[in-house]
Amino acid sequence: MFHLGLVPGRAWGALLCQLLRPPRTVCVRAVGCHGQVAEAVLTSQLKPHQEKPNFIIKVPKGTRDLSPQQMVVREKILDKIISCFKRHGAKGLDTPAFELKEMLTEKYEENLRLMYDLKDQGGELLSLRYDLTVPFARYLAMNKLKKMKRYQVGKVWRRESPTIAQGRYREFCQCDFDIAGQYDPMIPDAECLKIMCEILSGLQLGDFLIKVNDRRIVDGMYAVCGVPESKFRAICASMDKLDKMSWKDVRHEMVVKKGLAPEVADRIGDYVQCHGGISLVEQMFQDPRLSQSKLAVEGLADLKLLFEYLTLFGIAEKTSGEKVRTTETQVFVATAQKNFLQERLKLIAQLWDAGIKAEMLYKNNPKLLTQLHYCENMGIPLVIIIGEQEQNEGVIKLRSVASREEVTVKRENLITEIQKRLSES
Amino acid sequence: MADRAALEELVRLQGEHVRGLKQQKASADQIEEEVAKLLKLKAQLDPHESRQKFVLKTPKGTRDYSPRQMAVREKVFDVIIRCFKRHGAEVIDTPVFELKETLTGKYGEDSKLIYDLKDQGGELLSLRYDLTVPFARYLAMNKLSNIKRYHIAKVYRRDNPAMTRGRYREFYQCDFDIAGQFDPMIPDAECLKIMCEILSSLQIGDFLVKINDRRILDGMFAICGVPDSKFRTICSSVDKLDKVCWEEVKNEMVGDKGLAPEVADRIGDYVQQHGGVSLVEQLLQDPKLSQNKQALEGLGDLKLLFEYLTLFGIDDKISFDLSLARGLDYYTGVIYEAVLLQTPTQAGEEPLGVGSVAAGGRYDGLVGMFDPKGRKVPCVGLSIGVERIFSIVEQRLEALEEKVRTTETQVLVASAQKKLLEERLKLVSELWDAGIKAELLYKKNPKLLNQLHYCEEAGIPLVAIIGEQELKDGVIKLRSVTSREEVDVRREDLVEEIRRRTSEPLHIC
């Protein structure tokens, strides 16, 4: 049917732009029209020449028609997504566009005002479905199913303020995949992430990153930091804005607007600015404060297991935080031995004077492993390591953090070598 | 114990009371009150059940499509869409609701069947009733003068499902339309060709396409002496000829609708006729009918249509039937309806009855009504009654005892011994990355028998078994689930071997 090859960049952009084009409006006279299916006996009492007041022809606010060009793009995308779901053995499911109002309001107290209600026309009270998850839960309960791996692709409706420019509509398509059932831990969870990666890679939208966390770690973290349980939800809501706001602003909101104690906020700050791969999980296990929380330890254990499976699935690097660096440090100055603080200070000053972005740990005698972990977490590409032997020989070890390859460089050539490496990457 | 029995009795009585109220159509408030009492009683009986405060069901007249039904639906849509595309149609989509005023005044008496959305402070909206009005709106909004488009989507009607068995309030429509000014009858012929191609490909049995023309009917009624005011009502009587005999129809027209008996007889002479192009020729010679300009126009176009249908090789499926009169109001030219000649039934099964599985016609006046300059955009189209077809296909598959698979998984990655989860995860990931549809059980140490059983249940054809010895030897055991034949395949050849096996033509239903 379709050729699922590469769409040239510009063509892709043009096609995507069409998806965001606002609907045109035309002013016409409304007169009688007709329907065509044999079952519908359509009778109109209007004669063609009868005048009706003008009204604007348009689609409802927040919705749009999809032209043939837009449908081609949509079908290609949905085809790839559904193929992936099927490849993983999911069954298709479809549910009605509306549900009993009481079914939906039970689950979405906060979002009641965003739901489209149907008019009370003498029958059941109905609302348009808000997502595909509540219908799925209803389907499972109705059919008394304990296990199901299903996908559902369908439209949902929300009376949000549509910002068409940002692609936010009131009627939009959702593509859900869920695994329901009691299984051995983390295997289905790993498969969900694998599916996400397969789909995002397959759509060729560019590099992507999947952030992973665990509710228990979050709750445990808040608890050990001293967040009162009554403020959990409120703090969560603030913390969620970290992908859009800076830590400073989020902290301000929590302390000033939500009445969180500043030292508690600072403790949280220490944690939430960490991101990394499985090494971060290991690190958190060692954290003296966090390991006090039984809940957090549970979550960490499951994440550790998850990362093992993700590695077997070949996607562990897509779930680390390395692609998004928060600093631009190029070289880290490290040592394997004690009493080398002065040397590090001298060395780092030389790097700074040469305009190289460099860091070192504010510790007299840091462990090498800790320093290397730091580099990994922060995404620092190079580390120079000095020790007694190197000092006697007048050399420095220059190591690539990612590949772990090490070379020995003469002290006087160090800066040149670093600059060469940095310009190559 | 006695308490529980007494409670159960109370629950039973209250349940009956509620049912009685519902049957008597008591006030909603009263019913709600009694239901609440019932739920309270039930909660006492079983405290854990009380968490569920509402009835677990889909809204009246709607249903979920289970995986099995989805599989059937997908097959049917696949056939239909392939045909539309073969004929060069584009596809569009429109929102599920329209501005209320877009739909107002379009459906006459049936307007009361429209689902309105509650006034929540914004625009007044209604769920779409069909795909034709949205189509006309789309053409007008985009100032298009021609398009060949199909649209498959659900529409919503507050029908009373009790009255007509199998009628849903939410159901799929599958429309194809050609809009634009073209040389006569060629697009019309293509619509009929598409209808025949689809119904043949679906293999739901023999079918017949009845055709007629609005102008012929108009002309015929005119020369028979039907007063203009009775036109529509006489049409609906005549239309019943496919279900009841002429005598009954005549009685209804004369007795119930006040038509003069001799007029009825004259109508009878015509409407009981059906045939091929020879009937068209015959009517062209008819002394009375040939006096009527409209009828002549219609007959002329039908003659041309038959020529094209013969060239398309489908004239044997077409019957010119003068009793075809349904859905007549806005058709301006040819109209058609496809019926199945026999529906597959088994002992104990309810026959679906005679009903149309597709219908359509030409409607030239529609878009012109939306256009501010009254610019005409002639249209001809068809609609496939897919819901009926879903049931027929489902029944047919059941009759043939064919298993409908709900997944497309080709291989299950299994392990023969314990502690092989890692290997399974690695292997299944390789298969996914190679585009092969694969699964594994979410169990660290599943029993081989359970894994094989899972394959049989789900209809998975192959299982790739990892074993300790095989790992050392660098092979995987590839087993056919049906034949139980096993062969050792080198790890590096596995993907190719699976591809080869799954591309061989299998039994297609």
Image: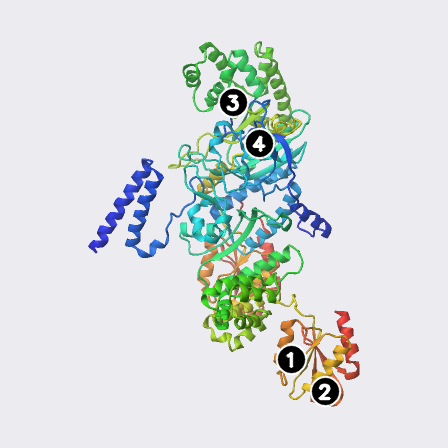
Category of crowding for the residue at label 4, using alpha-carbon neighbours closer than 10 angstroms: few (below 14), some (14–19), many (at least 20): many
Along the line of sight, the residue nearer the viewer: B386 or A252 = A252
Q: Position of residue A251 (x, y in %)?
A: 57, 67
Q: Nearer the viewer, mark 1 or mark 3?
A: 1
Element at badge 3? loop
Which disc number belongs to residue B325?
3
Does A160 sit left or right of A400 as displayed? left
Give, as a three-letter code, the residue at label 4: Leu
Q: Quadrant of residue B377?
A: top right
Q: Are marks 1 and 3 in contact (CB under 8 Å)?
A: no
> As displayed, is residue B329 above or below residue A333?
above
The image position of residue B482, as x and y in percent, is 49, 54
Residue beneath label 4, please? B382
Q: Is residue A160 shown above or below B480?
A: above
Secondary element at tag 2: helix
Residue type beneath disc 1: Leu
Q: Secondary structure at mark 4?
A: strand
